[in-house]
Image: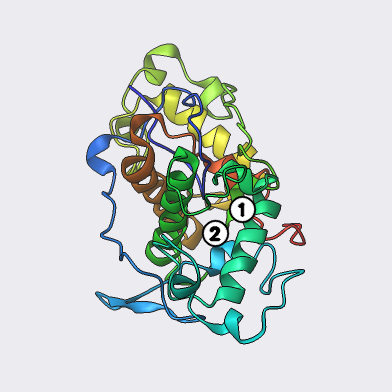
């Protein structure tokens, strides 16, 4: 069975090899939400959906880079909606031209690539949808909106930078098959049992054998640069804690990312965003 995702955040415009074949059971994976077609007014947000405010589409792009375009001063024109200035703007048409261009420049900084990655620059046909990377960029814009809305209550926590860090392809963090304690002390027959038959209060990863469960617990610790007690109470691992609850929410998040944007070959794992830190960076200036 293939891995459907363990992460925090965002992805890239190409296909990466899937991580190790450890998966969140498909019945536990949430489906993608219905997303709006148009962008919000400049600086605004989408209308609420079931009481949860929709995150705007532009902030995850501009926060890591620039809020105003560099080297472009076109006066009042820049205050007009991007959809009236440029052709074929499908997601960010209601955003001002200035902020739209700032977003384009910020994408360059976050992905370490220039306009030619998504646009037909030599042909001078920027509106064209001929390149698959352009459509993938739209998918990723929608994905960051969904993440910030569904998993962070509309707060802009995940940005383009969170995963890309200046590279077109987010780093493949690999997978460690080092069993942590107490798993190393368990006999083979116990490692082969289902996790919920050995440990109390297993929810998201029910159905997984203890050995693979142990691999994932150890991987969590490595990818977040934290020990088991970051989420668990030292004397009662089965007890609920706020961080354990959040970890389950992040498992759900990587599941709906996989199902909605990648299928079974999702490249998104905990390390995609965390990079060995408990709190992922939103910008290059954030160190934790």
Q: How many marks?
A: 2
**Secondary structure beneath label 1:** helix
Q: Which mark is residue 262?
A: none
Q: Mark 2 — residue?
A: 158
**Secondary structure beneath label 2:** loop
Q: Residue at x 45, y 74 (%)?
A: 84
Q: Mark 1 — residue?
A: 162
Q: Residue at x 60, y 64 (%)?
A: 103
- In this view, the residue in front, 275 or 234, is 275
Judge whether 49 appears above or below 283 on screen.
below
Where is residue 190 drawn, in percent x and y? 39, 19
Task: State yes or no: discs 1 and 2 in contact (Cβ < 8 Å).
Answer: yes
Inspect this view and state whether residue 226 appears.
no
70 left or right, relative to 157: right
User: For residue 177, which quarter of the picture?
Assistant: top right
**Residue found farthest to the front:** 123
Where is residue 201 drawn, in percent x and y? 33, 46
* Label 2 Cα neighbours within 10 Å, binned few <14 / some 14-19 / many ≥20: many
**Residue found farthest to the top:** 188
Where is residue 202 drawn, in percent x and y? 34, 42
Inspect this view and state whether residue 68 appears.
yes
């Amino acid at each position: 069975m293939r891995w459907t995702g363990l992460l925090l955040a965002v992805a890239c415009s190409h296909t990466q090899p899937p991580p190790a074949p450890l998966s969140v059971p498909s019945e536990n994976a949430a489906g993608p939400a219905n997303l709006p077609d148009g962008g919000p007014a400049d600086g605004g947000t989408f209308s609420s959906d079931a009481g949860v405010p929709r995150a705007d589409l532009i902030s995850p792009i501009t926060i890591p880079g620039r809020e105003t375009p560099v080297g472009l001063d076109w006066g009042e024109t820049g205050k007009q909606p991007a959809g009236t200035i440029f052709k074929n703007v499908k997601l960010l048409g209601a955003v001002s031209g200035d902020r739209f261009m700032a977003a384009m420049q910020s994408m360059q900084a976050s992905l370490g690539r220039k306009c030619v990655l998504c646009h037909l620059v030599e042909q001078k046909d920027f509106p064209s949808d001929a390149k698959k990377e352009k459509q993938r960029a739209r998918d990723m814009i929608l994905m960051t909106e969904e993440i910030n809305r569904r998993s962070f209550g509309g707060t802009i926590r995940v940005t383009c930078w969170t995963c890309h860090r200046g590279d077109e392809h987010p780093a493949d963090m690999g997978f460690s098959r080092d069993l942590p304690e107490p798993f190393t002390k368990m006999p083979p027959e116990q490692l082969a049992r289902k996790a919920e038959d050995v440990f109390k209060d297993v929810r998201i990863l029910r159905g997984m054998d203890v050995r693979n469960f142990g691999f994932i617990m150890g991987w969590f610790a490595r990818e977040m640069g934290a020990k088991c007690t970051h989420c668990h109470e030292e004397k009662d691992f089965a007890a609920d804690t706020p961080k354990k609850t959040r970890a389950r929410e992040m498992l759900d998040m990587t599941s709906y990312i996989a199902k909605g944007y990648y299928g079974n070959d999702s490249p998104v794992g905990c390390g995609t965003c965390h990079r060995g830190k408990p709190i992922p960076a939103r910008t290059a200036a954030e160190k934790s």
